[in-house]
Image: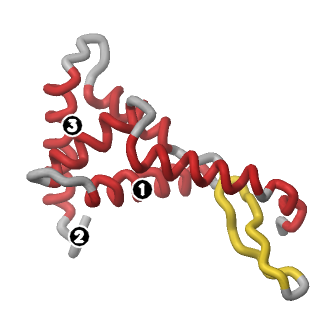
């Protein structure tokens, strides 16, 4: 949603779901099921936060609250949909939803990078507080 235009955002989302439905032609799954699976595929479980301890800054892996998981995943989906080339935002969002459903795309790559960073900094997990 940009500039508080909620109705425009809703229309873009519903148009994107219609596009996904027409492109996928998947009879056993509705576009809403595809959306849920795509969101599940790009939802991160952990993130890294900077903690300053004794003059050094460490990237400390932390679990994400369930509400924030959804917010972060939707934010990433929209971010990478905006970066895509395409005619309309609905087309770009539909393409990113399809990519996320197939474990591809920028949002999925962001989740994988986040998990990789958390795994690399696992040694600093004891700095959580």
Q: How many marks?
A: 3
Whichever of labels 2 and 3 marks the residue nearer the N terminus, that label is 2
- Disc 1 element: helix
Residue 117 falls in which quadrant of the image? bottom right
As measured in the structure, the alpha-carbon distance from the residue carrying label 3 to the one carrying label 1 is 17 Å
Q: Which residue is mark 1?
A: 76
Say whether residue 36 is left or right of residue 90.
Answer: right
Residue 125, given in percent of the width and then of the height, sits at 84, 59
Alpha carbons under labels 2 and 3: distance apart: 19 Å
Q: Quadrant for the N terminus, please.
A: bottom left
Residue 22 percent location from the top left of the image? 14, 26
The residue lying furthest to the bottom in this view is 55
> Is residue 102 placed above or below 120 in the rendered structure?
above
Give the quadrant of residue 105: top left
> Secondary structure under badge 3?
helix
Residue in view at x 26 percent, y 59 percent: 82
Q: CA distance from mark 2 to mark 1?
A: 15 Å
Q: Compare residues 89 and 12 and report the one nearer the observer.
A: 89
Q: Are marks 2 and 3 in contact (CB under 8 Å)?
A: no
Q: Are marks 3 and 1 in contact (CB under 8 Å)?
A: no
Image location of residue 129, percent across then percent down: 84, 69
Residue visible at 78% across and 58% down?
121
Q: Which mark is residue 17?
A: 3
Q: Please say if 36 is above or below 3.
A: above
Q: Which mark is residue 2?
A: 2
């Amino acid at each position: 949603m940009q500039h508080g235009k909620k109705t425009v955002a809703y229309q873009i989302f519903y148009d994107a779901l219609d596009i996904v439905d027409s492109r996928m032609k998947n009879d056993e799954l509705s576009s809403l099921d595809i959306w849920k699976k795509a969101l599940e595929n790009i939802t991160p479980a952990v993130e890294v936060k900077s903690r300053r301890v004794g003059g050094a800054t460490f990237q400390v892996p932390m679990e994400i609250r369930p509400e924030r998981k959804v917010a972060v995943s939707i934010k990433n989906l929209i971010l990478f949909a905006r970066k895509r080339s395409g005619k309309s935002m609905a087309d770009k969002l539909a393409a990113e939803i399809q990519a996320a459903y197939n474990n591809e795309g920028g949002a999925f790559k962001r989740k994988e990078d986040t998990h990789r960073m958390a795994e690399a900094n696992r040694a600093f997990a004891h700095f959580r507080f």
